[in-house]
Amino acid sequence: MFIEVIQGGRYEAEETGGFPPIPHETTEMTGIRHREGVISMARWTPGTATSEFFICAGDQPELDFGGRRNPDGQGYAAFGKVTRGMDIVRKIHDIDAPGQYLEKPVVILGISRKGK
């Protein structure tokens, strides 16, 4: 099943002193669906997400609770949304990535959080 996302995080650095896993919050619990620009946690099984995340490049309902992306049906934990710069997300998404990895990594220079 093909999905349209870009993924980032610490990946290899995670193996040498990463973050502890976080509890899995499904889209059924939060109401945040995997739509264009939504940011979500990557995981292997529920409760294994640490620092890897992805940004949806288009609507991705198969990543929601009950979706078919994973056999467990739990989906991924969506937690935020790109509010500026989706044009950059699309440009990154359009880069050819043999083996799913960019030949030249894109460095994230900053992330901000808006108040509640």
Image (spheres, rainbow, N blue to C red):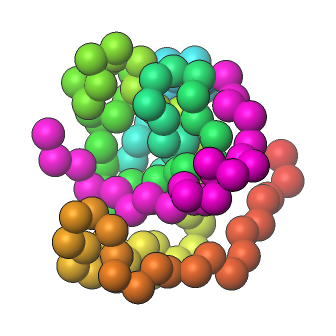
- Determine whether, in the image, residue 87 is placed left or right of residue 110: left
Looking at the image, is 69 positioned above or below residue 60?
above
Quadrant of the drawing holding the N terminus: top left
Q: On screen, 46 above or below 95?
A: above
Can you say whether 52 is above or below 20 in the image? below
The residue sitting at the left extreme is 1
User: In the figure, is residue 78 to the left or right of 51?
Assistant: left
User: Along the line of sight, which residue is nearer the eye, 11 or 61?
Assistant: 11
Pick whichever, 63 or 37, lies toward us. 63
Q: Residue 91: image x %, image y %?
A: 34, 82
- Total of numbered circles in the picture? 0
Q: Position of residue 20 (x, y in %)?
A: 74, 34
**Residue 32 visible in the current orientation:** no
Q: Please check the rendered image and state whether residue 6 is part of the magenta-colored stretch, yes or no.
A: yes
Q: Residue drawn 40% across and 26% down?
A: 75
Name the residue at 78% across, 59% down: 113
Horizontal side of residue 45 vs 30, given as left or right = left
Residue 107: in sight, yes or no?
yes
Query: Magenta region: which residues?
Result: 1-23
Q: Position of residue 105 (x, y in %)?
A: 46, 79
Which residue is outermost to the right?
115
Furthest residue in direction front, as rendered: 16
Q: Where is residue 115 drawn, in percent x and y?
A: 85, 53
Identify whether 40 is placed above or below 103. above
Q: Residue at 59% x, 66% y: name it.
A: 83
| 95 is within the stretch colored magenta | no
At a point 39% along the width and 55% down the height, the residue shown is: 56
Residue 47 position by quadrant = top right
Left or right position of 42 against 61? right
